[in-house]
Every structure is written in structure tokens, then in C-alpha cells.
Amino acid sequence: MSTDTSALTAHTLSDSTRELHNRWLLELTAIPTATGHEDQVIAWIDAWLADRPNLTRHNDPHGNFEIRIKDAPESEHPIYFTAHLDHPAFVVDEIESDTQIKLGFRGGVMADYFPGAKIRIHAQADGYVMGTIGEEIKTKNDAGEEVSCKPFKRYTCLLDEPSSIKVDTMATWDLPDAKIVDDEFGGMLYTNACDDLAAVAAALAAIDELARLRASGSDIGDIRVLFTLAEEVGFIGAIGASRDGFMPKGSRIIALENSRAFPESPIHGGPIVRVGDRISIFSPELTGAVAKVAERIAGGPSTPVASQKISDMPKWKWQRKLMAGGACEASVYCAYGYCSTCVCLPLGNYHNMAGLSEAQAGTHEGTPRVGCEFIGLDDYAGMVDLLVGCGMDLPSSPGFVERVEKLWVDTRFVLES
């Protein structure tokens, strides 16, 4: 592909297109989802695809699926944008009475947030039943010690009123309705599941724009989106797709995530080119290539070099960070021999844990409670821009060798005496 990515900036997409992308974001992130219960999100995506005959869906045996641009040339080295469809949530695993149930929690949340928490059991097609989480149900190990249940922690739950609920029903935290709140940076989205449905929205927005560009004559190659299941309990969908070789071995995979924001990786700081997680460092060549696209869009690096003033930095912001607070599917793809990296959104209230830093430090006032996750709309728009840029022209390498060779040619005279 030889499209000039410098033509793509944060201002390329129209305001109406941005508004449409924000609507998809708002709708998707409000959908209840859990590991093994991603069907409502899939139904939304299928309805979205029904209006786009230029995109095709291809399934794997595990429930993962990819989206391709119809009639785009297939290659041995397709570019994938990947995201997972689940979010930490409960699943009913035992009915004791019409007011007492037991649930397993599929995902990673501190134990402090559970006792007395209100949840919604989605036992009705058009509504839900309210309940209150009780104590954690323990089991005994071989030494006779009480430990948490495996593979999922289990909790009791008292329903607000007698109800007929079936085993395997999904339940989610009781959270306020999703909303967008204006701020000086263009707005913040507060919702129940940014992780990872905000990335799902960004992937769809990007491939929709790339399909449009191809239809208008642009040289858009083999770009695909892969949606995986069961990430929150150990990347199970991604492992299945990798073991089966669902993606060609020569693929370049850009995993999309929402990662816990820190002062050094702030919300409104732009999308993050993630060089690694707490498990591994991602493929350096691909990470560098994605960073090069970000530099071309921004017109500069992610942080000022020593000779720059902050006021001289580009307005289109991006970040390059390790993000070692969690793990993501890019590590799985790398483990199975794929070339993979990650782009993520800085996330507030990671896994719905409001006041997480205080809860971890033991300085939280009262019982920690869950809250809406939140992201910056500018970061989300930046992720879409970056993905479109990668789809238009992702370099085969970051070009660092060429840069150092030029440095050698231009400056080697200082070594000559």
C-alpha cells in the first residue's frame, strides 16, 4: 500500500462522522456482556453489518469472528485490529429459592467491592431483577484451608423480590445510565463497559472508514477486524484462534484495549501505543511501525524531546507507554508466534473499581463501591484516526535503521582525525 498517510489527520473525518462514531460508542458500551454471554454485543454488530454489504463476516469454531472488506485482495500478511467482546460480570450458577441465588464472577475485581453491592440479574428480555451481593462462598483445599472457588469466585445474592431465575443467567453491576459529559477536552464517556467495547466501537469505525476509502478508489489492502470471546478469564478466545491458526501466520495483529490510566498515562493524553504489559514486551518492529504512523499523523513524537517546548507539541496527541498494570491479548498472539502489538485507551475506574488506588492502599473511606468506567472522547477519536492511518499505510518497519544510517553518513566526520 502506498497511500500518503500524511493526508490523514485528526481533522480528516467530518463532524457528522465523528458524531456517528460517538453514537456507536455510546450504544455498544451500554450493552450488558459477560464471558460466555457476549450474544447481545454480537447481535448489535450483526445488525450493524446488515447495513454494510461491503463487509463480510467469517467465524472460527470457538465463537470468535473476523470482519473483512469485501473484494479486498487477500494476502499472507493481513493487518488485524482485534478486540474482545466480554467484560467482568456475574453468571448465576445455583438457585436456592425464589429469593436466594449463587453466582460466579468472571473477571478480575478486588474482593472489597463485592459485599453489599447491588447488581442487575438480566432474567428478562426487556428488563432485570435487582439483587444484593452477600458473602463470598469458600471451599477447602487439600490442607483443609478455606480458599476462593475455582475457576471463578462465587457469591451469595439476595433478590429484592421473589423471582423466577434460571441457571446461567448473566448479572452485571447496578450502574447509572451511560452518558457523555462535556469538558474542556471535548467530553468524557461514562458507561458500564468501556473495556473492551469502546475498542470494539473504534475497530468498527476504522474498518467502516477504510471500506469507504477503498470504494472511492484508495489503495486499501487486506485489513481485517477480529473479535474474540472470553478474554476476562484468561484470553480463552484469543488462545483458541491462535492455536487453530485462524489468522495467517504472517499477520500483523494490533490488539485494542482499555488500560488503567495513571498520572503518566492520563485520560485526554491521546491513544496509547502500548509497548508491552505485565507479561511481555510486544513485537518491537510492529510497535515501532504503529508509532511511526502516529508520528506522521501528529507531526511529532508522543513526548517533547529535550530541545522542544511543550507549547510546540502537536495538537493531535498520542502516547507511547509500557502499561504494566495488566495484561492483554497481544501477549497471547506473541506467544503463539504472531507479530503483535497493542493500542489502548487510558481508562478510568478500571473494571468498574471506583477509587481503586485508595482501595489498594487501604485508605478508602468506607466500603469501596463500583462506578462507571470512563474514557475521553478525544482519545477514542484518536484511536480511530490511528487505526485508519495504519490501514492506509502501515510501514513494514519503523525505519529506525534508515535513520541511524543517515546519522552515520551525515555525522561520522566527528570520528575522523
Image (cartoon, helix red, strand yellow):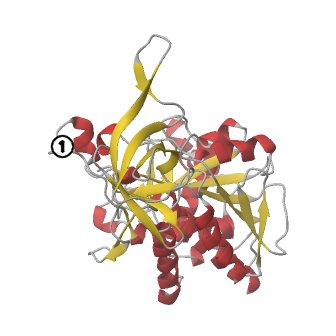
Residue at left offset 59%, top offset 66%: 40
In the image, residue 209 sits, relative to residue 92, either above or below, namely below
In this picture, residue 384 sits left or right of residue 362: right
Q: Residue furthest left?
A: 365
Residue 209: give x, y in percent of width and height. 63, 78
Question: What's under tag 1, amino acid-wise?
Answer: His
Residue 198: give x, y in percent of width and height. 49, 65
Relative depth, front residue between 138 and 210: 138
Residue at left offset 27%, top offset 75%: 183
In this picture, residue 378 sits left or right of residue 92: left
Relative depth, front residue between 379 and 200: 200
Task: Tell me the crowding category of disc 1: few under 14, some 14 to 19, or many 20 or more residues within 10 angstroms, Cα based.
Answer: few
In the image, residue 390 sits, relative to residue 166, either above or below, namely below
Query: Which quadrant of the figure has residue 225?
Result: bottom right
Residue at left offset 81%, top offset 51%: 248
Which residue matches tag 1? 364
Relative depth, front residue between 109 and 9: 109
